């Protein structure tokens, strides 16, 4: 019995450490975008012909709304998981994944609008190329996020042990909210520079 | 929340006993920190030998620029037609030598090995926070090594734009042969490497902050752990920046963007790219690149602290100052990168700022150097091979650090930039110092890794050949640099004023060859002792830290029973009043009444009262 208690204590400690690792990973990801931001600022300041020089497509506003909504549904899914409501958790997760996919499509759509305006990725004004870099790298993370959400879904569908399911959802939710905040940061950063 | 209900299944799943180990899970895809440490070390050693051979090749070219060595053609084929190394290949040699040494040997081989080995051992944990991620970290590193080696087998040769891969040279595939497929492979390899380091680093930080055993508060951690911890933080904050720089570079190379490129004519063709800035790359690169040199040297400082204290049989001098100086180096490492760019046309005011921050690094560095010397002072020194390497490390750190003051000076740097003075400086302060820190760690913790001792006589031979060799190789380079001999030149004898340096170059190359041969003593010792070494005892160096309380035979989970609790700091060596000259961290103060001093109790009135009572009863007088 005592042994079992020890094992539980050790497991909890490992989980705490894993969650902490996730936060550290987020710091790493943030640093990547911070580097791009400073690169953008330095580049854009290098000449009057540099800069975004266009109004950002409306699609970005829609995608912002979508990803905020997806954060809400993710939070609700997490709440449902804590209460052990597998059906609710699963449907909310599916909804979140769907919103993630819509976000992805909207971003691609925004790229389409930009290219229609003649603002291409291959561009001698690299400030405009930076728009694609920011959104593209964020999208790469979104795809990773969707995979994480799928994994949460599979966990709920199986279903795995309650506490493990909640732990998985907890990590998934932190990551997904981070992606949401990261997008808001990128969007505001680009808006301020348009 | 989730912690309130834990199913029995989950608890069992997460526990540390693995029953059915196969060859594959034990030796290849191991998730055990001890095995992963050995994997990192052996891979690092192989890469070090390879990178060293590359350096011997270019040293041969530098010493005898007009001589043919037909044997080179046998091995290198078209890269050494007629027995003479081609200029393109020479550039590849210096590039890959630098990349492998800095990243694969001194980052992964050093940090990867000893963080993995010592973090769980010395803080008292069963394993890393995430053993799976730890395994991934090694395998990403391994694949990065394979890809880098593979670049020697592509037709256009390996990357050759220098380890700093400055655009436009690296960004225009048609500019030189080494900027073709070889450069692409370099970038892929480094991306995998960064992923490996970030995964490793996250694990190290998380393990240190969350998995310490009872009683192991931060101020009781050995300096090794402090150095790995701060190194991992530096890596976590700086490596992602290199990812950004590399992503932009990849797009410039392969997709036609213009982040770094502008107004170029290559092979008679005007390139369409406009408006980019190669200086932007340098900023992003050195924001990683400078912290990287501390990623390389800080673990070496941590290892030597431990080894010097143990083998001087004295507490480390100024433990807190040692920690704070590491913290100081960590913080400063992020605000000095501009000193690599003094000659890029930087605003002199900005150059001045970077100069000041750079010179301030001399303060924590000097604190460390003096503390090492003060630890040695009147110690009961045992000159084990590990100790010799630790002292050698301090020697290189000092003699290489001093020239940092010259180079950090913006005005002097205009003269010294890109000369052999720079080569001498960083090879001493981060190259030799870190390698010596790593070797000191290998000799010291070998019994913990393999359960056997290394041969001391071979160790001494290895030390003296390497120590003297390294000084003979790098010291003369200072004078060449002051005379203006530029680094990375293939045939500087084309310039009459540099011809006089030929004789020095011959000396340097011979010293390099002898020091290189000296490594054979190490390799024989290292690999031979795995099977043929003397069996190690549990605590061969009579050391205080926790790893020496584990059994010699490796077991999963490190300690057979409960993890021991920690009662004191790790440097209670030669404590007056104690019959032995060391007191392990697991020994409580109640068992060492005859040697306790009042400040051991950190203001715990009750404990002080008990001690005072005991002192009175036993006629022991201690200063209050």
Image: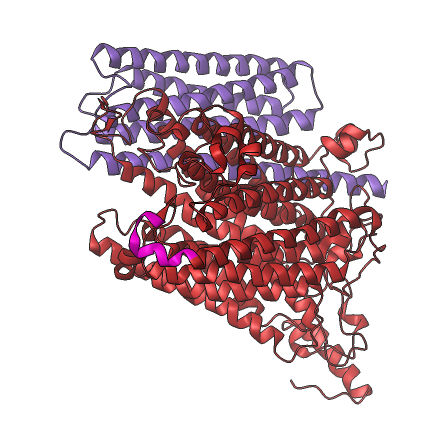
Task: Quadrant for the N terminus of chain A, please.
Answer: top right
Residue at 25% from the left image edge and 14% from the top image edge: A114
The location of residue B319, given as percent across then percent down, is 58, 68
Whether B499 is among the magenta residues is yes
Q: Is residue B476 visible?
A: yes
Total marks placed: 0
Quarter of the figure with the C terminus of chain A:
top left
* Horizontal side, residue B67 vs residue A122: left or right: right
Q: In this view, does B313 lie above or below B557?
A: below
Taking B567 as reference, is A83 above or below it?
Answer: above
Q: In which quarter of the image is residue A152?
A: top right
Specify start and end residues of the magenta stretch as a single range.
B493-502
The answer to whether residue A71 of the structure is visible from this angle is no
Is residue A98 positioned above or below B437 on the image?
Answer: above
Q: Residue at 30% of width from left, 21% of height from top?
A: B256
* Residue reaching furthest to the left: A48
Q: How is the image coloured?
A: by chain
Residue B255 is situated, as x and y percent measured from the top left of the image, at 34, 19
Q: Is the magenta stretch mostly helix, strand or loop?
A: helix
Q: Which of A116 and B593 is in front in this view?
A: A116
Left/right placement of residue B188 relative to residue B119 reads left
Q: Position of residue B209 (x, y in %)?
A: 60, 49
* Percent position of residue B461, x then y: 69, 61
Residue B536 is one of the magenta-drawn residues: no
Residue at 65% x, 13% y is A157
Q: Which chain is purple?
A: A
Q: In this view, does A3 lie above or below B614?
A: above
Colour assignment, chain B? red
Looking at the image, which is closer to me, B186 or B122?
A: B186
Q: In which quarter of the image is residue B243?
A: top left
């Amino acid at each position: 019995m005592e042994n079992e208690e020890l094992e539980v204590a050790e497991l909890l400690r490992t989980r705490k450490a894993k969650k902490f690792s996730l936060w550290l990973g987020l710091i790493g990801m943030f640093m990547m975008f911070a580097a791009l931001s400073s690169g953008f600022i330095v580049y854009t300041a290098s000449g009057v012909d540099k800069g975004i020089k266009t109004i950002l497509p409306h699609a970005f506003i829609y995608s912002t709304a979508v990803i905020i909504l997806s954060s809400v549904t993710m939070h609700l899914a997490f709440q449902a998981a804590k209460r052990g409501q597998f059906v609710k958790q699963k449907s909310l997760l599916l909804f979140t994944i769907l919103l993630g996919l819509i976000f992805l499509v909207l971003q691609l759509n925004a790229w389409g609008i930009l290219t229609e305006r003649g603002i291409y990725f291959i561009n001698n004004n690299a400030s405009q190329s930076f728009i694609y870099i920011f959104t593209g790298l964020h999208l790469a993370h979104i795809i990773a996020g969707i995979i994480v959400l799928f994994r949460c879904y599979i966990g709920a569908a199986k279903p795995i042990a309650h506490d493990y399911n909640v732990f998985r959802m907890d990590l998934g939710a932190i990551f997904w909210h981070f992606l949401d905040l990261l997008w808001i940061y990128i969007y505001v950063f680009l808006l301020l520079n348009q | 929340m989730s912690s309130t209900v834990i199913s029995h299944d989950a608890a069992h799943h997460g526990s540390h006993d693995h029953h059915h180990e196969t060859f594959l899970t034990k030796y290849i895809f191991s998730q055990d920190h001890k095995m992963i440490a050995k994997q990192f070390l052996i891979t690092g050693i192989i890469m070090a030998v390879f990178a060293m051979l590359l350096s011997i090749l270019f040293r041969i070219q530098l010493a005898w620029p007009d001589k043919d060595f037909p044997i080179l053609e046998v091995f290198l084929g078209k890269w050494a037609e007629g027995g003479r190394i081609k200029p393109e290949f020479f550039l590849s040699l210096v590039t890959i030598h630098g990349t492998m040494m800095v990243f694969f040997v001194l980052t992964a081989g050093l940090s990867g090995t000893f963080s993995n080995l010592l973090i769980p051992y010395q803080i008292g944990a069963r394993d890393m926070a995430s053993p799976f991620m730890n395994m991934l970290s090694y395998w990403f590193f391994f694949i990065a090594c394979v890809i880098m080696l593979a670049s020697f087998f592509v037709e256009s040769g390996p990357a050759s734009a220098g380890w700093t891969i400055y655009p436009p040279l690296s960004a225009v595939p048609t500019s030189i042969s080494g900027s073709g497929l070889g450069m692409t492979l370099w970038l892929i390899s480094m991306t995998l490497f960064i992923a490996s380091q970030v995964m490793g680093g996250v694990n190290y930080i998380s393990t240190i902050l969350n998995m310490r055993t009872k009683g192991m508060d931060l101020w009781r951690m050995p300096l090794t752990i402090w150095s790995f911890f701060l190194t991992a933080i530096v890596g976590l904050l700086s490596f992602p920046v290199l990812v950004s720089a590399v992503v932009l570079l990849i797009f410039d190379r392969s997709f036609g963007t213009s982040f770094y490129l502008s107004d170029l004519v290559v092979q008679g063709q005007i390139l369409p790219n406009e408006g980019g800035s190669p200086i932007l790359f340098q900023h992003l690169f050195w924001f990683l690149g400078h912290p990287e040199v501390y990623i390389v040297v800080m673990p070496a400082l941590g290892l030597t602290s431990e080894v010097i204290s143990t083998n001087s049989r004295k507490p480390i001098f100024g433990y807190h100052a040692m920690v704070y100086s590491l913290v100081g180096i960590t913080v400063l490492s992020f605000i000095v990168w501009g000193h690599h760019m003094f000659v890029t046309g930087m605003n002199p005011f900005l150059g001045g700022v970077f100069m000041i921050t750079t010179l301030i690094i001399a303060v924590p560095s000097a604190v460390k150097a003096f503390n090492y010397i003060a630890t040695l002072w009147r110690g009961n020194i045992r000159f084990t091979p590990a100790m010799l390497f630790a002292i050698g490390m301090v020697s290189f750190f000092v003699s290489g650090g001093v020239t940092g003051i010259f180079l950090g000076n913006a005005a002097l740097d205009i003269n010294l930039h890109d000369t052999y003075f720079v080569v001498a400086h960083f090879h001493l302060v981060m190259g030799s110092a870190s390698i010596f820190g790593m070797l000191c760690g290998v000799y010291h913790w070998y019994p913990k890794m393999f359960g056997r001792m290394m041969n001391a006589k071979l160790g001494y031979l290895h030390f003296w050949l390497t120590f003297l060799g390294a000084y003979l190789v790098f010291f003369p380079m200072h004078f060449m640099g002051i005379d203006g001999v530029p680094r990375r030149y293939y045939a500087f004898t084309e310039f009459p004023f540099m011809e006089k340096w030929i004789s020095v170059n011959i000396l340097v190359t011979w010293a390099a060859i002898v020091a290189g041969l000296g490594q054979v003593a190490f390799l024989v010792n290292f690999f031979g002792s795995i099977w043929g070494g003397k069996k190690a005892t549990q605590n061969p160096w009579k050391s205080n830290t926790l790893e020496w309380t584990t059994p010699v035979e490796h077991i999963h989970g490190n300690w057979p029973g409960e993890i021991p609790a920690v009662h004191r700091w790790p440097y209670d060596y030669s404590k007056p009043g104690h019959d032995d000259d060391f007191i392990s961290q697991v020994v409580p103060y109640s068992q060492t009444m005859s040697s306790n001093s009042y400040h051991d109790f950190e203001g715990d009135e009750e404990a002080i009262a008990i001690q005072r009572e005991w002192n009175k009863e036993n006629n022991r007088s201690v200063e209050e």
